Structure formats: C-alpha cells, structure tokens
Amino acid sequence: MTRRPWPKAVLFDLDDTLWPIVPVIRAAETILYTWLQQHAPRVAARFTIDSLRQARLELLARQPEYAIDLSALRHAGLVAAFGQAGEDVARVDEAMVLFVAARNAVTLYDDVAPGLARLRQRTLLGSVTNGVADLATIGLADQFQASVAARDFGRAKPDPGIFLAGCAALGVQPADTLYVGDDLLLDVQGAQQAGLRAAWMNRSGKVNELADQVRPDVEVDSIDALLAWLDATHEPPHKPPQEPPHELPHGSAPMRV
C-alpha cells in the first residue's frame, strides 16, 4: 500500500467531536431558568425552557443571520422574553454571563487531551466551529495554533470559506489538511467540498445513512483511532510542525464568547 504524506494540519470541530454538547446545554438552560425564577419571575411564569427554545427557533426562522452566532440568538431571545413579560431587559446581560459560564463547563471525552497533545507534536492543529465555545475557558486554547468561529468569520459550515480560512490561518493548503468532525453534512461533506480530506468522528456508532452521497476518508470513534489510522496509512512527518503565520487572514479571528 502506498502511504500518503502526513497531513500538515488537522482541523477539528468542537461540539460532539471533543465533548458531548447536549448534556451541557441542558444543564446550562436549567441553571439559567432557575436564575429566571429567582430574578425575573415574570419571565419564568410566562415561559418554560421549551417555550423559550421554540421562541428562539421562530426568531431564527425570521432572522436566519443569527445562525452564525447562537449566543447572539439566545441573547435576542431573552431580550424579547423579558420585554414581553415586563421584566428589566437590562438584566439580560447578567443572565447571559451565567449561561455562558455553564455553556463552557464541558467534560472532554477521555481521549481528547492526550490525543491532541500527541497530535500536536506531529502536525499543526486548529479548530473550525459553528458554535460559541470559549477554548480558553475550557482549557484547550493552547492546543490549537488557530481557531475560526462562524460568528467571527461571518459564514458557517458547510460554507467552503470557513474551512479555507482555517487552512489559511495555519498557512497550509486544503489538500494538506485533514478535518475531523461528527456531522456528515456540515463537517465531512463541507470539508471535502472545500478540498480538505475529512474524518468522520462517529463516537456513538451511528450508521451512515447518507453513504450514497457522503463518504468520509475515514471513520473513527476517538482521537486514538484517528492516530492509529494516520500511523498505518501515512508516512511519518519528517520534521516538527512549523508554527503558522502570526497574522491571521481576514475572517479568522481567534474564537471568543
């Protein structure tokens, strides 16, 4: 078997690739709702967690530009709810601080911290996300040489531009880059259409029901499995990864919340 060159960079999705996101959001929404009951009781009396979520979805349908910044969507949803309930809208920022802190209280999958540390010795690492996680708060910022978020870039996956921005931020070509994500359409197909190779991070053993249209370059269930595939099918890197340019291209600002 002919081995390929080791990728010059590996870009990662975040939510549901490096940590499970559903339990985090549920916990954060519960914490927020408890705060509402205590500090904005008329909002809590008028809305449930589910009806607040439905109101956000309706707002998103009316203003799809919020799709690139879910934190701004939640803020706008709370502003609307506070206004409808007759509560002090000025307190929405206080509520958002609480929610953001809970939103970033993630639990990494066990393989993530050691796996990223091993990968970082052999290639450049970055992240490309549609989400609003704060890598500094989570404790992963030092593992990535560049991070691109949809709300900073102005376009979201699967738009090819955001993947290309991740490559440009690391100073590598798309063909020399591997993208790793859990969503077949947003991550795998999106990255491949931008010229990157793509690994499907399938931690829960899902069946690829889109196999006729989306074919990952590899399917793995952990970073350990990704490393094993790279070792088995690629030539080892000849030298340590070079740090990317210090000036990031337009649209690839470091991630923030």
Image: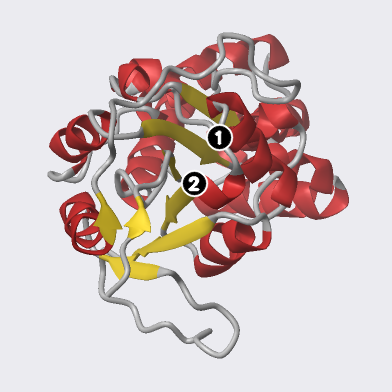
Depth order, front residue of 82/213: 213
Depth order, front residue of 24/212: 212
| Residue 252 visible somewhere in the drawing | yes
The residue that disc 2 covers is 177
Location of the N terminus (image quadrant):
bottom left
Helix, strand or loop under label 1: loop
Of the residues shown, which amino acid type is indicated by label 2?
Answer: Thr
Q: Residue at x 55, y 78 (%)?
A: 214
Rendering quarter of residue 255: top right
Rendering quarter of residue 37: top left
Could you say which disc has been placed on residue 130 in the image?
none
Of the residues shown, which amino acid type is indicated by label 1?
Answer: Val
Q: CA distance from mark 1 to mark 2?
A: 7 Å
* 129 sits left or right of 54 in the view: left
Helix, strand or loop under label 2: strand
Q: Which color mode does the image show?
A: secondary structure
User: Do the residues under discs 1 and 2 have CB atoms within 8 angstroms?
Assistant: yes
* 159 sits left or right of 31 in the view: right
The residue that disc 1 covers is 172
